[in-house]
Amino acid sequence: MIILKAENISKQYRLGLVGTGTLSHDLNRWWHKVRGKEDPYLKIGETNDRSLRGESDYVWALQDINFEVQKGEVLGIIGKNGAGKSTLLKILSRVTIPTTGEIKTKGRIASLLEVGTGFHPELTGRENIYLNGAILGMTKKEIKVKEDEIIAFSGCERYVDTPVKRYSSGMRVRLAFAVAAFLEPDILVIDEVLAVGDAEFQKKAIGKMQDISKADGRTVLFVSHNMAAVRNLCTRAIVLKNGTAAFEGNTDAAVDFYLKEGARLTSDSGFYKHNNELNNSKAICLNSVELINSKGDNTNVFISDENIRVVIKYSLLEKLPDIRFNLKIEVDNEVIVFTTTSHEDDKTDKSKGDYVLEVSLPEDFFNKGFYKMTLNVGVPNEKVLIEPLTILNFEILKLTSSGSRVNSVFPGVTAPKLKWNVVKVQS
Amino acid sequence: MKDEPWLYTISSKKRLLDFNFREIWRYRDLLLLFVKRDVVTVYKQTILGPLWYLIQPLFTSVIFTLVFNSLGAIKTEGVPPFLFNLAGITIWNYFKECFTGTSDTFVKNQAVFGKVYFPRVVMPLSITISNLLKFGIQFLIFLGFYIYYYALGQVHGFGIVFLFLPLYVLIMALLGLGLGMIVSSMTTKYRDLTVLMTFGIQLLMYVSAVPYPVSEAKAKFPPLVASLVEYNPLTQVVEGFRYIMLDTGNFGLKGFVYTLLLSILLFLLGLLIFNKTEKSFVDTV
């Protein structure tokens, strides 16, 4: 059953200051309306690309967004800063209305956008639970039932009868999130950015969100930058880009699309074709080197949790006593990450013929960034067949931010995923 | 389940009349909590607390009595001038508080309104209700002084017209709320009215017959100003309140009906404009 339906949602904003110029536009708009004509400013307006300088005073923060949400579905909404996520959320949570189009819903929507709105500093924690809960749409009765749970979840038992102005900012957020987390609307809009507080509480908050979205088939719209969380929770996702829906589909494909949007290497040049004219060796003919992702596609942009298959095709023109392929991976500032060789695993007889050599670079190993791949081929201790040759560049995109609130990159040439073991030995 | 109708639509179209009273009713707990918040928090961390509710009208009455009655020699139709002024100020205060309290609804609450949806009208309604409590306290003080002057034999009790009192209070609430909602809607984009508000309310008091009876206005003001004062609905309420309590001035059913209708009209107009504004004011505030 479709519980929510958005049709042609567009939202136009006027840039710049409100002043006398605005009044003249308002009057013009009114004059058109009086004569039954269309709003003249709806025809203009530019796509919302924040980095480009535009001509018009009007921008479209959202343009022709269409989507449907099934009951019980967890829909992810992803996009870069300024893509229109917040605007869409604002419209969904009825804070403002779209410029054109409409959203129809069969259930009540509540949003966990900004927690702690309406907290009054002079009131105690308990009083604020009631006030905030009511602002979010709960009745006094509903709050009363959950009061103890809310207080326990916030972990502010001790301060609950103290005015909120005496709280630390972290405590305020905890309390606010606790209230919001116990909402029970038909459709819940969650902005994952709100998972603030210390590490312990963050974990609790994200866990709670997962519970909410997984438990009893609640319909959830989940907005996040954390692709791991989106993958984990959502059944479907929409990627917003400059105010338009750039992609809609299953979560994996959407996450892929989003991450690759941010990639600097955009050509599908994970393929190297060797020019054998330049070869000074008569013994080998290097045909191609290909990078293949986990889906079997040829690409040069990879997500950190997939392995990279390097497929080298070559022909031997004569029988060789031995052969060794060396693959060197460097980061873009020329620091060698590692060198690996085919020598020990090559059990072929090295006679004349066509060969396919394959090596898999492990998942959860590279850090976010650009890497350079250099190949050289030789007969060990005898001669060089192919001089070191930079054959391919590839880029690694990171799925998560390792618990940081900002999407920062952990320092290091590599970022291997290691197994940590924690045991409590004494309390 | 299949044919369940849409619960509501978020649309670009603003219908002129689009009140959802059921929804407002659903948020009644919020209304009460806002009232509680307003009442509880105003005088937190003050020593005198709610006593401050009393000090303002008393001091104002003393000043008025000194300036207008001792210095200005305005006659108060045989009622002790202090009591006369206190009566005017008590009822006027209720209007003033409702008006000024609701007139910045959108601007003051943009942080909350910009993040969560609830029927916006809950906010001005709660202000009107919490001010009613304040009015109640101030009215009790007035009654205290009334009894004192009654014991001195300077006023002589009130009769059955006392039953009109709740109606006059209601009219004041409607006027304050209506005007407040209009002003708050009109100041979301252009702030010009905010400037007017700061001194306008003071001026309005002087043309609402608060520190003088209408009979004096008729006798001494130029005719144009006198009729302005007389037909001001606020004058009608202030004068009516004094008629009930102090038996001054005169009460006409025509004037009463005129005021009642006007206040209802103003309230509905305010509700209409407010309702139209609330949908997208966040974008321009």
Image (cartoon, coloured by chain):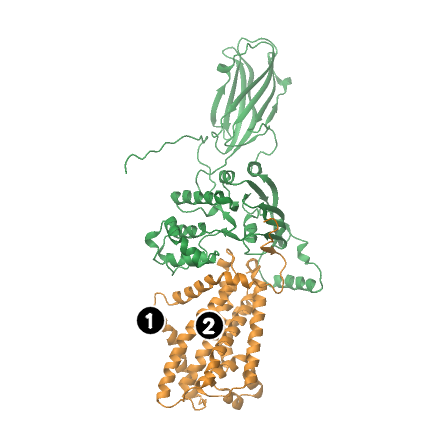
Chain colours: A green, B orange
Amino acid at circle 2: Glu
Seen at 35% across and 55% down, the residue is A160
Q: Position of residue A283 (x, y in %)?
A: 59, 11
Residue B59 numbered tag: none
Residue B43 vs A63, above or below: the answer is below
Q: Mark 1 points at which residue?
A: B48
Residue B97 numbered tag: 2
Q: Which residue lies furthest to the left in this view?
A: A426
Quadrant (top left/top right/bottom left/bottom right) for the C terminus of chain B: bottom right
Q: What's the chain of the residue with tag 2? A: B
Quadrant of the image occupied by residue B12 = bottom right
Q: Where is residue B25 in the image (x, y as percent from the top left)?
A: 51, 63
For the residues marked 2 and 1, what is the alpha-carbon distance in whole angstroms? Answer: 20 Å
Q: Where is residue A317 in the image (x, y as percent from the top left)?
A: 61, 11
Amino acid at circle 1: Leu
Q: What's the chain of the residue with tag 1? A: B
Residue A268 vs B85, above or below: the answer is above
Assess disc 1: are there few (<14), some (14-19) or many (≥20) residues with their C-alpha within 10 Å of its C-alpha. few
Q: Is residue A79 visible?
A: no
Residue A220 vs B252, above or below: the answer is above
Dot placed on the residue nearer the N-terminal end, 2 or 1 = 1
Assess disc 2: are there few (<14), some (14-19) or many (≥20) residues with their C-alpha within 10 Å of its C-alpha. many
Seen at 52% across and 30% down, the residue is A306
Choose between A38 and A254: the one closer to the eye. Answer: A254
